[in-house]
Every structure is written in structure tokens, then in C-alpha cells.
């Protein structure tokens, strides 16, 4: 039981660490670093001042932010997964091996549902990044100052990370 709780806490802790990293993305404009993500809820908002000058770039930024909002489906799946875990923890071991009310089934199913919901959410966010890049490209075609932005950077140059994003 203690191992399960430690596993859940370590997963939650790792998601907090990865979440902090996405808020530190910067773009270079006029040789100055500009914070791209001012908050987790409005990713890309730091570039709005520049991208609003171009209607197409602004439209792509708005679409990017709309697609990054949490959905009721992911919230419902996470809530249901949490309820399954709690039901599994509170279930007594009466020896009943009913398929869907088994203690182990509820706990493992709840953890799996939360994990699946998290992976789907991260995948959607990762696949949505092209809208932000297209928005910056459209702005750079017709406006100055130019925005230089790489989705992830390892300090040695620009690149796309695959280690943390699904």
C-alpha cells in the first residue's frame, strides 16, 4: 500500500517538474529574450504583442491557445480515475472476486485511466505546437522585428525534444 502511494506521489512530482520547464520557453526579439509562456493557461501569450500586428499570425495564435485549453473529457477521465482509486482503497477484502469491483482492478484501472488521460493531453499539446510555429513564420514574413524561436533548446542549438513530450 505504501509503495503504491509513493509511486503515485512520484508521478505527480515528476509532472510538476516537467510543467515548470514549459513555462521557461523564450524567443529572441531584437537581441532580447522574451518569455513565450506567461502562464500555463495561456501558452504563447508573451508573443501576442508582436503577433497581433499580423491578422493571420494572430488568428493562428488564437487557435493555438484554444487547442491548449483543458477539455471536459480529460477532466472527467481524471476525476473518474481518482474515484476508482479511492473506491479501490476503501473497498474491503471480503473475498469477493467480482470482475469490476475487485480492489486491485479498481486501483490499477484508476491509475491507468489517469495515465492515459495525461498522455492524450500531452500528445495533443505537442501536436498543437505547429500552430505557434506557423504563427511566428507568418509574422516573420511580413513584419519586423523578427522573432527567433525554437520549441526546445538544449543550450547547444535548437531542436525538437522527444524525451519528455509524447
Image: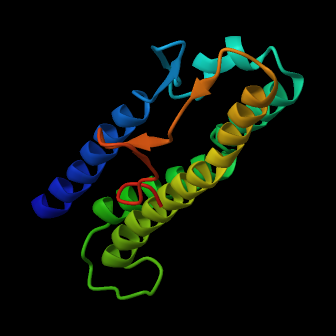
Q: Residue at x 43, y 28 (%)?
A: 23
Using the rendered image of the protein, determine whether residue 42 is visible from the camera's viewpoint: no
Task: Pick whichever, 140 or 17, lies toward us.
Answer: 140
Q: Residue at x 34, y 68 (%)?
A: 107
Image spot of residue 16 (x, y percent): 32, 38
Colouring scheme, one of rainbow, by chain, secondary structure, one colour: rainbow
Q: Quadrant of the N terminus?
A: bottom left
Q: Residue at x 41, y 54 (%)?
A: 161
Task: Pick whichever, 77 or 1, lies toward us.
Answer: 77
Classify residue 70 by image quadrant: top right
Residue farthest along the right direction in this orientation = 55
Q: Residue at x 28, y 53 (%)?
A: 11
Classify residue 165 by image quadrant: bottom left
Image spot of residue 111 (x, y percent): 38, 64
Residue farthest along the left direction in this orientation = 2
Task: Pick whichever, 121 or 152, lies toward us.
Answer: 152
With respect to residue 72, does 116 lie above or below? below
Task: Pick whichever, 15 or 26, lies toward us.
Answer: 26
Using the rendered image of the protein, determine whether residue 77 is visible from the camera's viewpoint: yes
With respect to residue 105, does 140 lie above or below? above
Indicate left or right for 8 with 114 as reference: left
> So how many labels did they put on this image?
0
Indicate left or right for 104 with 149 as reference: left
Amino acid at each position: 500500500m505504501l509503495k503504491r502511494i509513493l509511486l503515485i506521489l512520484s508521478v505527480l512530482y515528476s509532472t510538476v517538474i516537467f510543467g515548470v520547464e514549459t513555462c521557461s520557453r523564450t524567443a529572441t526579439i531584437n537581441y532580447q529574450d522574451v518569455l513565450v509562456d506567461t502562464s500555463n493557461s495561456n501558452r504563447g501569450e508573451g508573443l501576442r504583442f508582436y503577433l497581433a500586428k499580423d491578422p493571420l499570425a494572430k488568428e493562428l495564435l488564437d487557435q493555438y491557445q484554444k487547442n491548449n485549453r483543458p477539455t471536459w473529457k480529460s477532466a472527467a477521465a481524471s476525476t473518474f480515475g481518482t474515484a476508482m482509486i479511492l473506491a479501490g482503497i476503501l473497498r474491503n477484502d471480503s473475498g469477493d472476486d467480482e470482475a469490476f469491483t475487485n480492489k486491485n482492478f479498481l486501483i490499477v484501472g484508476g491509475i491507468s485511466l489517469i495515465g492515459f488521460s495525461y498522455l492524450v493531453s500531452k500528445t495533443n499539446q505537442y501536436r498543437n505546437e505547429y500552430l505557434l510555429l506557423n504563427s511566428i513564420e507568418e509574422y516573420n514574413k511580413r513584419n519586423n522585428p523578427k522573432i527567433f524561436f525554437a520549441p526546445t533548446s538544449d543550450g547547444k542549438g535548437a531542436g525538437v525534444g522527444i524525451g519528455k513530450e509524447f
